[in-house]
Amino acid sequence: METLWLILLVFMIATYVVLDGFDLGIGVLHLILPKNRSEQKQIMQSIAPLWDGNEVWLIAAGGTMMMAFPGFMSAMFSGFYLPLTMVVWLLIFRAISIELPHFLEDSLWVHFWNMMLFVSSGLLVIIPGAAMANVFRGVPLNAEGDFFEPLWTNFRIGKQTGILDWFTILGGITSAVILLHHGALWLIAKTDGAIQQRAQMSANWLWGGSILLTLIMFPACYLVQPHAQASISDHPWIWILPVLAFLALGSTLLLRRLNRPMFAFLCSVGFIYLFIFGGTAALYPNLLPGLNPEHHLTIYNTSPSPEKLAVTLWWWIPGITLVGVYFTILFRSLPKVISAAATDDH
Amino acid sequence: MLDSLLLHRVQFAFTASFHYLFPQLTMGLALLIFILKTLGLRGHAWADVAARFWLKIFGLTFVMGVVTGIPLEFQFGTNWSQLVKSTGSILGQTLAMEGIFAFFLESAFLYLLIFGEKKLSKKLHWGVSFLLLLGTWLSGYFIICTNAFLQHPVGYRIDENGVYHLTSIWALLSNPWALKQYLHTMTGAVITGSFTMSSIAAYHLLKREHVDISRKYLKVSVIVGFTASLIAVMPTGDWEAKQVLKHQPVKFAAMEGHFHTEDGAGMVLIGQPNLDELKIDNPIIIPNVLSFLTYASWNAEVKGLTAYDRDLWPDNIELLYFSYHIMAGLGTIFIALMGLSSLMLFKGKLHTTRWLLWLLMLSLPFPFIANTAGWFTAEIGRQPWLIYGLMKTADGASRNISEGNVMFTLLGFLGLYLLLSVLYFFLATRLIAHGPDRLPQVDAEIATEEGI
């Protein structure tokens, strides 16, 4: 039962990364790609109705985490106190930067919020990778399952870890490039004209970057976490996940060349899912490894009542099915392609 | 010197109180917009125009509610990690339900409501306004359920390690405390929504702008406001007071400023609690009324604060007492103001009675104050307990975070929320100044309905 909830929780977190990932990526790209205000509006319209629903996955994942693995949430959130509070601030800035510009048609006002959106999205695309790298590397948990990490120490991995070290920074850069690529793929699928062309060009570069960083990231993960090495040698099937992930990322380029942009985007979705599930499989059954292996937080010692988790499925499954219905209605209500000319009624 | 427990409390109290300024308005407006859309569906074109105007204000307020709500879920984990560690599997149920059943509904359908009017049929658009109402009200229910577990825990067992296990999800969701508190809180939200609407209508009428349409929706908001103000006192306020008396008698005595046990206790209307001498300074007390309201008997005995162990007294009795009296006092004023407005409406004179319009316009902030005071009463009154009778607040806070870190984030939230207030105020006043759109056919329709 704990394993099932781990899969469900990771599914929710990964869905959050997949969905908010493209709108965060676009939050960065919207300042780089367009040449005029109407192109910028065209870009923003491809995410404006969606960002809020996308972000709800984060909130729902938080609730699910608290319900299924309260010991994990308690350790994570209090241990990463400062970075998480700053994430909250960035999410606030990002949300108002998307929603407030069209209340006032003033160029300075619009420009200010665009800059804010660029900065907050830019930091927020780095964070999922850095956060996952922190969890993967492990933290200095004590016997009570608590820890507190400074933001950084000497950027090396050793007894005195900081939230930022070479591995987590690498993770952050990797997630930034992957999510920008992800955002560019969404734009290619949802826009036309000059913006689509420029998104194609940036996607070429970002694709190369994603491939390169993924190639560095896989062996780095293997090196950093001894548990992962043991786990992979015990269960060699885990290799399938990174290999499939790599194939999915590779095929986004092929599908773009074949002029199937929506399929390319979906491959990128698959890539992110496989990447995150690969990391989870390598850590299993740990949720948050300690630097001292005796203090690992596992799915068993952070979850209080497996029998209740089974009962919870009775409302959880219909609930998520409903969410699927809402998202289908919402995504279908959007125009297939957003043209620069059609941006005036927003 | 400030300790980190106090900083955790202040930070959560501040972010939660600031957050609740927005959802109380959106939950109230969701109902009013639904009423307007229903009138629109029945052929009143003005109601659709009014709904569109109020949706703009709803949209802006909703954004503020969303962004200030995110920190609260995070803070359970960041600031109250010991609470999460022991009770997360229970509190997480209702919080996860809120995300899954309510937030997704709201976020998906708000977009369709705001941008879908041209694309959807009239009936579908009305249906979307209903779904939004459902989403916002469900969201409120799940939050009240979470709070109700802290006020009146049900459906749990505690194991030998002090970890709480859920024994019945049904008990958690049908917590009698939650049902009563929900009804009282939601009537409070409807009061905020209707007072805001009548205040803006009064503003436009006083300025002689958008007169026809403002008259129309002023009528809706005054009727809804009067009904909600009555319900807030009787029966929901009465239920709420009685359940506090039954389950949290110390809170009840402190709220009322009732220090000493007596038969035929009087109700304190005005006065300042004096904790050194355990009495009320400058009191105006109506004799025997407290006994009557609590036990329906003029001479019943009502226990005072001194009947309880001093360790169990809330740590800020003055603030608790004033919060409760501000809430109750404002509630009485709301009934009087809306009652008078309804009377004038009935006589057909409301929109020309300028002094009353002035009062309605200036009353805008008071429901917000009353609702905040209500939450202060509920939460300060629960002290020193985090989970009433089971877990002290001091045992629920995170242990591994230094004072400096909490101080840093508290200052950060203060600054950020100050910025949000300025932005909200600036944008909301612009929307209000712009007013509802003018449509010639609507003016004509209003003219025919009025028989001009």
Image (cartoon, coloured by chain):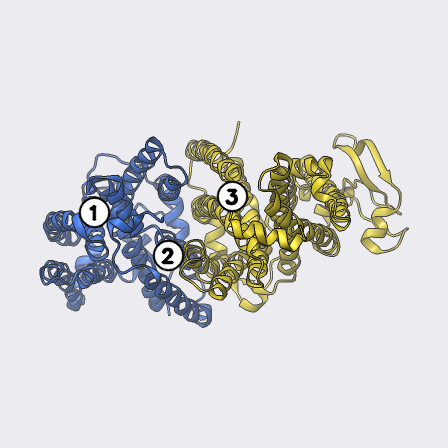
Residue at 47% over, 63% down: B101
Q: Nearest the camera: B341 or B245?
A: B341
Q: Nearest the camera: B153 or A302?
A: B153
Is residue A144 visible in the rendered structure shown here? no
Work out whether B356 lies above or below A214.
above
Residue A50 as seen in the image, left or right of residue A195? right
Q: What subunit carries mark 3?
A: B
Q: Nearest the camera: A321 or A159?
A: A321
Q: Amino acid at mark 1?
A: Gly
- Where does the image place residue B239, in percent across and percent down from the top left? 73, 56
Work out whether B406 lies above or below B44.
above
Please give the residue where the numbered disc 2 appears in the rendered image: A57
Q: Amino acid at mark 2?
A: Trp
The mark tally for this picture is: 3
Judged by depth in the image, the label closer to the viewer, 1 or 3, is 3
- Where does the image place residue B40, in percent across and percent down from the top left? 56, 59
Q: Are marks 2 and 3 on the same chain?
A: no
Compute the Cα span from label 2 to label 3.
20 Å
- Where does the image place residue A278, in percent across and percent down from the top left? 21, 61
| Disc 2, SS | helix
Residue at 56% over, 47% down: B25
Task: Identify by letter the chain in yellow.
Answer: B
Task: Identify by letter the chain in blue.
Answer: A
Instruction: Give the mark, 1 or 2, whose residue is nearer the N terminus.
Output: 2
Is residue B442 visible in the rendered structure shown here? yes
Q: What subunit carries mark 1?
A: A
Please give the residue where the numbered disc 3 appears in the rendered image: B19
| Disc 3, SS | helix
Judged by depth in the image, the label closer to the viewer, 1 or 2, is 2
Please give the residue where the numbered disc 1 appears in the rendered image: A171
Few, some or many residues within 10 Å of mark 1 (<14, 14–19, 20+): many
- Where does the image place residue A27, in percent across and percent down from the top left? 28, 44
